[in-house]
Amino acid sequence: MPALPPPAVTFSAADHPWINVRTGPQYDQVGLRDLFLDAHTTDDLALPHPPAASALLRIAVAITARITGLDAPELTASQWNALRRTCLEQGRFDPDAVHAYFDQHTWDVFDPVRPWLQEPALRTQCDHSSGINAFVPGRPAGNNLAWFSPHGHHTAEPVPTAEALEILLIHHYYGRSGQCTPRTVDGVTTRRQNSGPLRSSVSFHPLGRTLHETLLAGVPAFTGDEQFPGADACPWEEAAPGPQTPPTGVTWPGRLLTGLSQHAILLVPGSGGSTVTDAYLTWAAKEPKQITTDPYLTYQFITERKNVARRRIKHSADASRAWWRELDTLVLAHDEHGTHLRPAIFGTLNDLPEDLRRNLRIRVHGFDQDGKVIDRQWYTAITPPLLNWTQEHDPVKAQRIAECCRGAEQTAQQLTALAKEAWYTATRSRTTQPPWSNKALTRYWPKAETAFWRLLAEPDADVPAAFAAAAAAALREVTEAARISHNSAARAVAYAIQDLYRQPPAPPKKTA
């Protein structure tokens, strides 16, 4: 069992550089304190891992609420909006408030008593560490084969502490479920953990012209649903509750944004604290995850589920799904008959100053995972300014967007079915995955995106015809060789394209 790290081993998340930021063409690394002191001159975060960026934005927004007073639940909606406008007009975060906050708490990653976002009790509650390879995504661990990595059980390379902090955030927010390093509490040993609160999700964050604007625009308003008896606190603001005394409720904004982790972690430093050589990674809570509304996620309502509490599910991230296909959910306001709910943060953006609102874009951070252990791919994107397209500001534009999104999805389904049937007709082969379907769909979506933006610019253009043309072009491309070689393929594709232009019955309208 490793001993307590010596006092000389330190790395402050507040004052040591570990966060990548961008200002114009220049990139730099800063700690959390400088992130706020220089937020008004910083364009954006530049973390290489989108899930770490999404997690850090939630932490930074919680700190923003603290140093600005926007975390006061007694403020009325008008007072809260007025305070946020005042903070925006000031043009920067108050340096005295920033220093006062960071001087008040412990930020040392290797602090022997209160390491930042970690549980020191794991030194005694776990009889062995998990290993650095199990901690770093992409490395093989245990008996897994090293297909794409030079790392192995006997070649566990240390990780720079700056990089390890980003990985720490990924585990806290997107960590896997299932088997983990055993942890013993009150004489009972358990080795099963729940998945992270954001696992397999895609987040939509407001993106301003500076990081100062981004953080203030991203503060969620108090709704009255997330306040329980007792003070709200982020994990670094009080002693860790531990598995014996779990928190009683989700409070706003600290615990809502930073305190829902299902994983307990402890990093083992290398010499001097510049690297991490080992890690403990295990469960943090035995109770099922609490049902909350994350302000940056979209949700879908499934009424046929018997468990009422589980009828609302978050939209899953899909690396193959372009962000514009979610535009209808983002621009349409929810109504009582809707099946989709846009991010709650959108409800606060209409009260921003006009010049900021018109320039505000949306940063998309997704992590395509299964619900348990498989990590497929993470991705990110930035939308153009779209708040002026929302139903509250331009209902005609919002409905046009919804119509185009529905048309694109409907044509995609039609293309898949027709390409499959054309393959069967041409080859007489009833394979489960006809190659024309997937290939045609892959080529269809880039063409559909081009058609989508053209349809928005031309309000009178025919939506079904535009997407049918994109689908027909995609199908012709993937079947070109077969059509040249075989008359049966040419006839089958010709009939499929003819059917593409026949409009099928319209599906139920997506109203939110």
Image (spheres, rainbow, N blue to C red):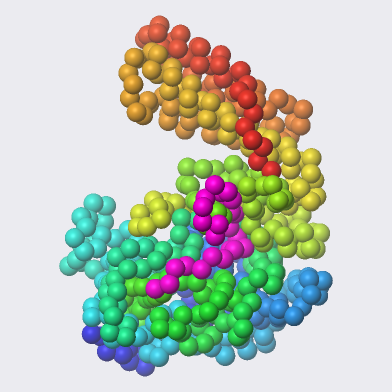
Residue toward you, 16 or 328: 328
Task: Indicate the position of residue 404 as horizontal and vertical percent values.
Answer: 66, 34
Residue at x 76% of width, y 48% of height: 391
User: Would residue 134 appear left or right of 459 to someone viewing this image?
Assistant: left
| Above or below, 131 relative to 366 | below
Is most of the magenta stretch helix, strand or loop?
loop
Residue at x 36% of width, y 63% of height: 177
Asked whether residue 156 is drawn in magenta, I would say no
Residue at x 37% of width, y 57% of height: 372
Q: Which residues are magenta?
A: 286-309
Residue toward you, 494 or 186: 186
User: Would residue 212 appear left or right of 182 to someone viewing this image?
Assistant: right
Residue at x 77% of width, y 63% of height: 352
Residue 316 at least partly seen: yes
User: Would residue 56 appear left or right of 398 to someone viewing this image?
Assistant: left
* Quarter of the figure with the N terminus: bottom left
Asked whether residue 308 is drawn in magenta, I would say yes
Task: Indicate the position of residue 484 as horizontal and vertical percent values.
Answer: 40, 10
Residue 277 at least partly seen: no
Residue toward you, 159 or 415: 415
In the image, farthest residue toward the top: 487
Residue 219 figure quarter? bottom right
